[in-house]
Amino acid sequence: MTAKSVGFLTLLFAVMVSSCGTRQPEAEFPWLETPSHFPEINHPDDNELSLARWELGKRLFFETKLSVDGSKSCASCHFSESAFATNFPTNKGAFGADGTRNSPSLANIGYHPYFTREGGVPTLEMQVLVPIQEEDEFHNNILAIADTLSQDSTYVVASLNAYDSEITPFVITRSISAFERTLISGGSLYDRFLAGDSTVLSNSELSGLEVFISKGCSNCHNDFLLTNFEIINNGLYEEYSDPGLFNLTGNTEDIGKFKVPSLRNVTITYPYMHDGSLATLDDVFDHYVSGGSSHPNKSELITPISLSEEERSDLKAFFETLRDNSFIEWSSSL
Ligand code: HEC
Ligand code: HEC
C-alpha cells in the first residue's frame, strides 16, 4: 500500500473511531442494527422513531394514492432492489410526465446534510413535499392527500397510533421520513474491511481501493459513505441544460454544481450522474480519464488521469465490495 493510501485509511479510521461506540440494536427494531462503525442516526426531537411511525411511513412510501392520478408511489422511482435508486436515466411521474433527473439512491439518506442534487432542501421532512408537488412526479397537494387518506379508516387508526393525531401534512411528512432514516446500508464486504477484518478483500479489490485513492477519487468520494457531500462541478458538460446549484442561487459560478453522490451500492445504481447520462461504470471511468469538459466552474481536482485495463477491472472489483446484499434482501422484502 502506498503512503498516500495509508494516510487515507488512517483518516478514515479516525473518523470511524471518533463517531462510533458500542451500540445495542433498538429493541423494537431487531432488524435495525446501526453498524458500529457508523454514527448514530439523528432522529429529530419532533419525530423520534417508533414502530408505529415506521410502519405508517413504510406504507405511505409504497402508496400510489400520493400521486394525483393514483399511479405512482415513492417506490416507483426509488426501487428497493436498486438500493432505492432506479435503473433508468429518468422516471415518469403522474400522467406519464417525463422527469429530468436521475433518482438517487436513498440508502443511508438519513446521514445526508441536505437533499436533492443541488442540496437545496434542509430536512428529509421538507424533502417529502418536493415529489408531492412536482408536476413530473406526484403533481399533487399535501392537503388533498391528507383528505384522501382520511377516508381510509386503517390510515386514521395508524396515524392515531403513530402521532396521536388525525392524518395531516405533519403526519405524512414525519412518518415517511422516519421510515427513510432506517434505510441504513452498512453490511457490505467493504464494511467488514472497515470494521477491521483486513482479510476480506481480495488482492484485486484492495488494488481497486488503492487506484481509487491514488487517482484522486477519494478527494471527493470519501468518509464512510464515500462522499464529502460537497456541491461540485465535475466537468460533465461544456453547457448544462440543468444548471444544478445555479437554480437556487442565480450565481453563474454555481452552474453545473451537484452533490457528490455516495458510491455505496454503486454497481446497482446505474445509470450515473444527475441526469443518468452515463450508462455504465466504464462510461464514468472514460469521463474521469478525459478530465471532463473545460467548464469554468469545473473543480480543480478533476484533471485527466490514466487508467489501465487492469486498473479499471480492479476499480470495478472494489466497487462490487460496496454492494450491500443484506440491505437489498431486507429492503426488497418490505
Ligand atoms: C417520478 C419519480 C420520483 C418519485 C415519484 C419520487 N422521487 Fe424522490 N427523487 C426523484 C428524483 C429525480 C430525485 C432527484 C431530485 C433533485 O435532485 O431535484 C429524487 C430525490 C429524492 C431525495 C433526495 C435524495 C438526495 O440525495 O438528496 C429523497 C430523500 C427522495 N427523493 C425521497 C422520495 C420520497 C419519500 C418520495 C415519495 C414521497 C419520492 N422520493 C418520490 C424521483 C422521484
Ligand atoms: C472533484 C470531486 C470529484 C472527484 C475527484 C471525483 N468525483 Fe465522482 N462525482 C463527483 C460529482 C460532483 C458527481 C456527481 C455529478 C453529477 O451528478 O452530475 C460524481 C459522480 C460520480 C459517479 C456517479 C455516481 C452516481 O450514483 O451517479 C461515480 C461512479 C463517480 N463519480 C466515480 C468517481 C471516480 C471513479 C473518481 C476517480 C477517478 C471520481 N468519481 C472522482 C465529484 C468527484
Image (cartoon, grey):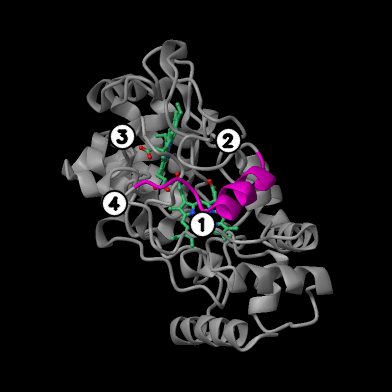
Disc ID at residue 130:
3
Q: Residue at label 1?
A: 262
For residue 86, which numbered disc appears in the image? 2
138 lies above or below 77: above
In percent of width and height, residue 4 lies at: 58, 84
> Which element is circle 2 on?
loop
**Which amino acid, by three-letter code, is at mark 3?**
Val
Depth check, mark 3 against mark 2: the one in front is: 2
Compute the Cα span from label 1 to label 2. Answer: 15 Å
Question: Where is residue 141 drawn, in percent x and y?
Answer: 26, 23
Does label 3 or label 2 sit earlier along the sequence?
Answer: 2
The N terminus is located in which quarter?
A: bottom right
Counting residues from the N terminus, which is met first, the one under dot 4 or under dot 1? 4
Expressed as whole percent of the image width and height from the top left, the position of residue 153 reads: 39, 25
Q: Which residue is mark 4?
A: 123
Query: What amino acid is labelled 1 in the image?
Result: Ser
> Left or right: 144 with respect to 249?
right
Ligand 1 closer than 8 Å to label 3 CB:
yes
